[in-house]
Amino acid sequence: MPEATDPVIGQPPFENYTLTNAYDEMFAPDGSIRPAYIELARRLCSLSPDELQQRQRYADLTFLNQGITFTVYSNEAGVERIFPYDLLPRILTTTEWQQIESGLHQRIVALNEFLRDLYHNEYILRDGIIPRHLVYSCRHYRREMRGLTVPRGAYTAIVGTDLVRLPDGQFVVLEDNLRVPSGVSYMLTNRTVMKRALPLLFSAYGVRPIDHYGQVLLATLRALAPAHRPEPTIVLLTPGVFNSAYFEHTFLARQMGIELVEGRDLLAHNNIIYMRTTKGLQRVDVIYRRIDDDFLDPMTFRPDSVLGVPGLFNAYRAGNVVLANAIGTGVADDKAIYSYVPAIIRYYLGEDPILPNVPTYLCDRPDERAYVLEHLDELVVKAVGESGGYDMLIGPHSTREEQAQFAERIRANPRNYIAQPTLQLSRAPCFVNGVIEPRHVDLRPFVLFDGERTTIVPGGLTRVALRRGSLVVNSSQGGGSKDTWVLY
């Protein structure tokens, strides 16, 4: 069985494994096995390809039977797919996790301070730390939130922050997801499947648990309830069965033991929200909403919305119901505002960022726009308000025609685009087509914040670019996921 210094690359089942300039989660540059992965290497070398394939089929069948799916809206052939799962875990040491945990705590506290200031005093704009026009031109900025007090100052109670590891081993923040972050159900189901597919391997490691997430989320939502409602009724508001994350909505509602509702199940009366039940109307105190701001209330936002609740915003403004996350939080995860987060941390906390940002070019700035247009073949260009890998150009993997199309988009609406260097995301071993090969990965830990406490379950959703050579980990673009282990 292999030790840390034993040559494993080139031997079964690693005969197709190669190292590049990207950081490899399992192997050091000299090919030796990183200490946290030695036991995994031993177990993999003791299993035949048929045994590994059998366990992968078991995992896939479990996902199928449980209906663990996601939706690709752009795919006309069939929009619903089983979420791709990779059998091999991604392992993080205690030291690595401590840095991630402290960095995310710092970031979330600062972003909540930013949102509170932005919708009240605007000190950060007055002091010129962030340009006013950048905030006011953000489509997620909500003037309706000006002067509205959010319970315990928790604008972003549920956060999913995307991290990548660079070739030097450093973790950096790729983007923040502060509106309606998704993916935590896949983190939890990945762990359940892993325990059954490779039970001996899991028991051989001291892996910190994550299955308490649902109860911590419920406690966070309870803490945000109106003070005069000591036994609050909490619901999860979903757009419905056709939403790409509907599986997650049902999963989390079941985990917390709360009702899953659609807009038609709720009504507003005298600035109070009620839920229709078989026993009559029941008052609702906290709504964990999985609907974007635009669709929450047709009386305040989009009048054509059939997903929300007429009168919801007035009840929210009156303090009779709490929304998590708060309306207007999207301004803080705008990809142009993202570039200012290090300055936001320094401004509110007086600290340097523990987790740095990726260098970012704002196409709204003439000099940076000119640089981006000249280097489209080298950069990654993103729309500031999109997610899921949509409206994005990966320069080195793009055609001249695609570059020309993005150049036109940037010139037509420069505020809508940012650009970043093409990063060499770290790679981790994956079981693909019967063999073990490296694939690029990122990491989305999930943060809960109730205004006083920050809770981060030890793990996260490791997303995998399953296509060889691809840097796009989004499930909508062919990516999958794997279990993430944080060791004691």
Image (cartoon, rainbow, N blue to C red):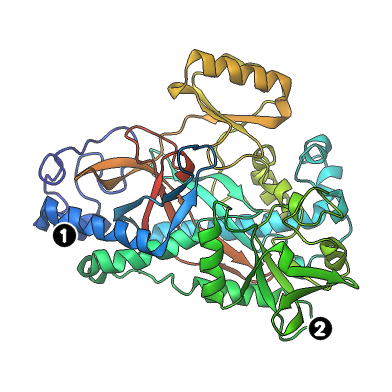
Residue underneath mark 2: 228
**Amino acid bearing label 2:** His
**For the residue labelled by badge 2, is the local secondary structure a helix, a strand or a loop?**
loop
Query: In the figure, is residue 360 to the left or right of 434?
Result: right
Pick the residue in front: 114 or 137.
137
Tell me if 324 is positioned left or right of 127 in this view: left
Q: Is residue 333 above or below residue 190?
A: above
Give the label on residue 43, or none. 1
Can residue 366 be seen in the rendering of this structure? no
Residue 479, x across and y down, in percent = 41, 43
Q: Position of residue 221 (x, y in %)?
A: 66, 73
Residue drawn at 28 percent across, 47 percent down: 430
Question: For the point 11% across and 48% down, which residue is it?
Answer: 6
Tell me which label, 1 or 2, sits earlier in the chain.
1
Quadrant that contains the N terminus: bottom left
Horizontal and vertical percent for residue 211?
44, 72
> Mark 1: few, some, or many residues within 10 Å (few <14, many ≥20)?
some
Q: CA distance from mark 1 to mark 2?
A: 55 Å
Q: Position of residue 433 (x, y in %)?
A: 23, 43
Name the kind of residue labelled 1 in the image.
Arg
Q: In what element is the residue under mark 1? A: helix
